[in-house]
Image: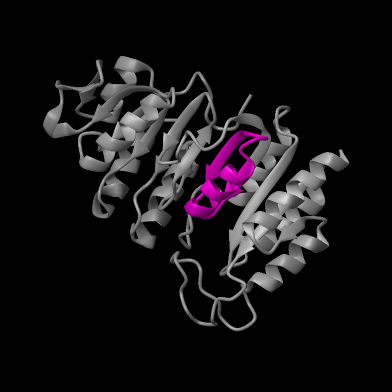
Amino acid sequence: MAIFLTADSKVVVQGMTGSEGMKHTRRMLDAGTDVVGGVNPRKAGTAVDFGGREIPVFGTVKEAIAATGADVTVVFVPPRFVRDAVDEAVDAGIGLAVVITEGVPVHDTVAFRARAEAAGVRIVGPNCPGLITPGVSNAGIIPADITRPGRIGLVSKSGTLTYQLMYELRDLGFSSCVGIGGDPVIGTTHIDCLQAFQDDPDTDLIVMIGEIGGDAEERAAAYVREHVTKPVVGYVAGFTAPEGKTMGHAGAIVSGSSGTAQAKKEALEAAGVAVGRTPSETARLVRDALAAG
């Protein structure tokens, strides 16, 4: 089993015919993803050859769903077009929209997230690497060859740290890995993934990666305390970040004592979450927790 992305998921790619869309569609196919179509109104009716596999291009997401039964879209369009692309997918009845694009205006994200929530559509992102169920399906840009299937669930704000922990624990493997993105406003949250992994019978332990800024990790800590019985290991990036400076992600900014890595670490540890100060230490804590049973 997995969360959000399974062997039955049928994926369309909005922006498949662009350079990034082409590159990552090829990688998704190589990872076993059932990519069933692309969407580009200007190239509707054509097809793209990916190493002998012809992927059709549709004019709209609605047409793609009608023809293929797609239930997931991966969005590779420029920031100014993301809101229209996600709104189109939501209105067409897609189940999951994975928004890879960075630089999406926050007010656009607020608008399409509200529209998606009203329609019961899950958004992952924006400004995220997507999600992967190793050995089964990959929706986004996560490298599929750095880990294998296993029983650890991973949720992370950071794409790079997603990859790092996947590699550090590659011998153990993962049930699913979700990069939720580091923007101030996102769709799927740490808490959404914690709940899903808690409910997933094939996940034995959860790794949660956060970073400075905001209070998402503190809220996740409160959720763990009340609702999660599986072991959780955490890592918070940004212990050495200077106050008031944005670090990497648009949401990674500390104001005064709010949102610091130390404050997040203390909140998580108070909820029973073991927290590493480096990715390698975090991987060691995971091994210790699994060995302890």
Q: How far across and how far down the image is residue 192, in percent?
A: 62, 45
Question: Residue at 57% across / 68% down in the picture?
Answer: 214
- Choose between 108 and 156: the one closer to the eye: 156
Image height of 258 relative to 235, above or below: below
Tally of numbered tags: 0
- Choose between 179 and 126: the one closer to the eye: 179
Give the color scheme: rainbow, by chain, secondary structure or one colour: one colour
Task: Place residue 38 in its image quadrant.
Answer: top left
Question: Residue at 87% across / 42% down in the picture?
Answer: 292
Q: How far across and how far down the image is residue 236, in percent?
A: 63, 62
Q: What stretch is highlighted in magenta?
A: 154-180
- Choose between 267 and 168: the one closer to the eye: 168
On whether residue 46 falls in the magenta region, the answer is no
**Quarter of the N terminus within the rendering:** top right
**Quarter of the C terminus within the rendering:** top right
Task: Place residue 238 in its image quadrant.
Answer: bottom right
Q: How far across and how far down the image is residue 284, in percent?
A: 73, 51
Report whether 256 appears left or right of 76.
right
Q: How far across and how far down the image is residue 18, in percent?
A: 20, 39
On whether residue 157 falls in the magenta region, the answer is yes
Residue 228 seen by the camera = no
Image height of 89 relative to 54, above or below: below
Report whether 58 appears left or right of 13.
left
Question: Residue at 56% across / 80% down in the picture?
Answer: 255
Question: Residue at 82% across / 63% down in the picture?
Answer: 270
Image height of 122 relative to 12, above or below: below
- Choose between 113 and 281: the one closer to the eye: 281
Residue situated furthest right in the rendering = 292
Image height of 177 relative to 252, above or below: above
